[in-house]
């Protein structure tokens, strides 16, 4: 009889431990604090942070990474008849034919933004929709940013 009672206590203890362990495992992520934004380093010259509410990312580079990629920027401007324009070199096409530019909202920070092209006029793309006038856009090296965002280099 003592053996049966001891075995029941052992089984009960094991079951309670499993239930408590499962509860703690499931509840801890909900209580955790959000991670601080990653900072690029020499070992990791680019960091990606999700843009909340979108499928986009903020790409932050080290100064050395910007130099190595040869990134150059231009500016979204008001062109003929008040049309929004960006340098044609800023336009990227994805595999579905959608058009994008990389904006440069802060020093060494880049964010992809959808654009709608009305037409191409020489070295300028006239847009139906895009970044506000005065926004810096990447005109050289955007392909590398796209590759970093989608990890196409690996």
Image (cartoon, rainbow, N blue to C red):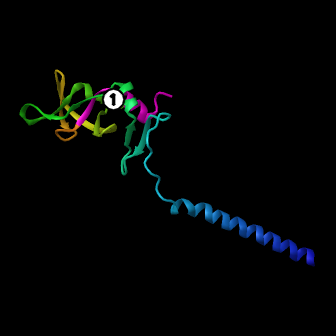
Task: Please tell me which residue lies in front, 87 or 110.
Answer: 110
Furthest toward the bottom, the residue is 1
Report x, y in % for residue 25: 61, 60
User: Any magenta on residue 144?
Assistant: yes
Task: Please tell me which residue lies in front, 31 or 95.
Answer: 31
Report x, y in % for residue 39: 43, 43
Q: Is residue 108 left or right of residue 9?
A: left
SS at circle 1: helix
Quadrant the N terminus occupies:
bottom right
Instruction: Tell me which corner region of the image, top left, top right, bottom left or bottom right, holds residue 45.
Output: top left
Report x, y in % for residue 111: 33, 39
Q: Residue at x 92, y 78 (%)?
A: 2
User: Any magenta on residue 151?
Assistant: yes
Find the magenta span and give its range. 136-154
**Disc 1 marks which residue?**
142
Instruction: Tell me which corner region of the image, top left, top right, bottom left or bottom right, holds residue 115.
Output: top left
Q: In this view, does 52 lie to the left or right of 86?
A: right
Furthest toward the left, the residue is 81
Instruction: Tell me which corner region of the image, top left, top right, bottom left or bottom right, holds residue 8.
Output: bottom right
Q: Residue at x 71, y 64 (%)?
A: 18
């Amino acid at each position: 009889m003592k053996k049966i009672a001891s075995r029941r206590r052992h089984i009960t203890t094991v079951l309670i431990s499993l239930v408590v362990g499962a509860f703690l495992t499931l509840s801890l992520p909900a209580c955790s604090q959000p991670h601080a934004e990653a900072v690029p380093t020499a070992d990791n010259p680019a960091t990606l942070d999700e843009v909340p509410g979108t499928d986009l990312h903020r790409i932050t580079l080290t100064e050395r990474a910007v130099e190595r990629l040869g990134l150059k920027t231009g500016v979204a401007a008001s062109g003929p008849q008040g049309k929004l324009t960006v340098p044609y070199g800023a336009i990227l096409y994805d595999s579905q034919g959608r058009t994008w530019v990389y904006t440069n909202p802060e020093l060494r920070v880049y964010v992809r933004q959808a654009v709608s092209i009305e037409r191409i006029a020489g070295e300028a793309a006239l847009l139906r929709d895009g970044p506000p006038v005065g926004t810096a856009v990447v005109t050289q090296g955007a392909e590398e940013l796209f590759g970093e965002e989608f990890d196409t280099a690996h």
